């Protein structure tokens, strides 16, 4: 055997070994201890999602899967950890809609959202509900719009903070409806909701499940949902879209991300395993009981969704002139 033939055989063997290794890697997940980074404190909805998925992955693989809570800086701390992790798929992020907002709100991030992170699968989506204090002289969304246009800057909308999802939803309404509703930031959703209930602020876009108790108790007046269609738990409440603004949609969504250089076959495998976990009745029941939809999208579907969300919210941020403080 001449040298050329020997080298060709050696290269071929190496390529075959590499392909077999990649194939084996894609077939077993997790193949070693893994961690799921949650960029929020324990006990919240994102943490619950992370722990449900971690348990199911551990059960199916026999590997240890831990949840690592890294809250702070508008989810940037936890996101950076995953963006700079080894691209082996064993450090996952439970990201939220905040991940597509931060590049527009912050002048500089310690990672590139589009290249240092890879979308794996969307977990769930929950709409916002626009609610108002009962003293507001508007009993539905259209009456509120008439009032807002008659009082430019005179109506106020509470949020969990500058650049939060409910803040941007209010600004999306201003952009599409031509209103000038004034944003009032709080340190968290609970404080914002409490002040709407107390009548200090007229209204807020809030996670539907966070305010449904107050709505049923008559402490808040429901005006509209931000979903594409009416929700089962409150079928009498119209959507913003059907109230004169087709295409209006905003939600709190969760999804799994990994480091950007993670091999595509491994990303698809992770998506399959997470999707299998999400479809188990005990897991899906948790999300549906909180008013969310279990999605379990493919990496391609989630990637396209992330891109479209980034474009939409970047335009809203620019229109409103929002900057992080």
Image: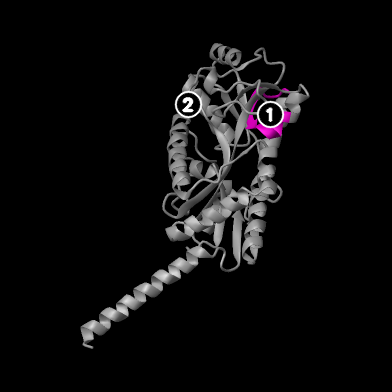
Q: Residue furthest right?
A: 217
User: Is disc 1 placed on a helix, strand or loop?
Assistant: loop
Query: Visible in this render: residue 273?
Result: yes
On-image quarter of the C terminus: top right
Of circles 2 and 1, the one toward us is 1
Question: Could you say which is closer to the camera, residue 50 or residue 163?
Answer: 50
Q: Is residue 218 magenta?
A: no
CA–CA distance in space, label 2 to label 1: 22 Å
Question: In the rendering, at what x and y percent does residue 66 appear?
Answer: 65, 61
Dot 2 or dot 1, earlier in sequence: 1
Using residue 190 as the reference point, say whether residue 301 is left or right of it.
left
Using residue 116 as the reference point, say whether residue 6 is left or right of it.
left
**Vertically, is 235 above or below 68?**
above
Query: Visible in this render: residue 198?
Result: no
Question: Could you say which is closer to the camera, residue 186 or residue 32?
Answer: 32
For the magenta stretch, what is the residue range?
A: 199-212
Q: Quadrant of residue 181?
A: top right
Give me the residue at 51% from left, 23% from top: 174
**How many residues crowd mark 1 within 10 Å: few (<14), some (14–19), many (20+)?**
few
Question: In the rendering, at what x and y percent does residue 93 appear?
Answer: 56, 54
Question: In the rendering, at what x and y percent does residue 218 appear?
Answer: 76, 21
Question: Could you say which is closer to the camera, residue 195 or residue 20?
Answer: 20
Q: Quadrant of residue 21?
A: bottom left
Q: Quadrant of residue 68?
A: bottom right
Give me the residue at 44% from left, 59% from top: 265
Residue 81's label in the rendered image is: none
Q: Residue furthest bottom?
A: 1
Q: How is the image coloured?
A: one colour
Number of numbered discs on residues: 2
**Residue that mark 2 sits on:** 247
**Residue that mark 1 sits on:** 233
User: Is disc 2 placed on a helix, strand or loop?
Assistant: loop
């Amino acid at each position: 055997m001449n040298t050329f033939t020997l080298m060709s055989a050696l290269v071929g063997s190496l390529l075959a070994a590499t392909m077999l290794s990649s194939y084996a890697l894609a077939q077993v997940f997790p193949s070693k201890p893994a961690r799921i980074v949650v960029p929020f404190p324990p006990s919240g909805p994102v943490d619950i999602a992370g722990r449900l998925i971690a348990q199911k992955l551990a059960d199916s693989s026999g590997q240890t899967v831990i949840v690592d809570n890294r809250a702070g800086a508008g989810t940037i701390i936890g996101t950076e950890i995953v963006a700079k992790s080894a691209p082996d798929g064993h450090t996952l992020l439970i990201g939220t809609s905040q991940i597509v907002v931060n590049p527009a709100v912050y002048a500089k991030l310690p990672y590139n959202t589009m290249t240092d992170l890879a979308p794996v699968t969307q977990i769930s989506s929950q709409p916002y509900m626009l609610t108002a204090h009962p003293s507001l002289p508007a009993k539905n969304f259209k009456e509120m719009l008439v009032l807002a246009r008659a009082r430019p800057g005179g109506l106020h909308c509470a949020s969990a903070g500058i650049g939060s999802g409910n803040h941007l939803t209010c600004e999306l309404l201003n952009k599409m409806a031509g209103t000038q509703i004034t944003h009032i930031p709080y340190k968290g959703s609970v404080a914002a909701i409490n002040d709407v209930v107390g009548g200090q602020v007229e209204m807020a876009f809030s996670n539907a499940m966070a305010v449904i108790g107050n709505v049923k108790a008559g402490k808040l007046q429901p005006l509209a949902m931000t979903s594409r269609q009416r929700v089962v738990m409150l079928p009498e409440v119209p959507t913003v879209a059907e109230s004169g603004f087709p295409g209006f949609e905003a939600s709190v969504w969760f999804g799994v991300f990994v480091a950007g250089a993670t091999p595509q076959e491994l990303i698809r495998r992770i998506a399959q395993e997470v999707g299998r976990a999400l479809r188990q009745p005990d897991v899906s029941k948790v999300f549906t009981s909180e008013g969310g939809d279990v999605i379990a999208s493919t990496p391609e579907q989630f990637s396209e969704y992330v891109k479209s969300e980034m474009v939409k919210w970047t335009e809203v941020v620019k229109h409103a002139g929002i900057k992080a403080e």
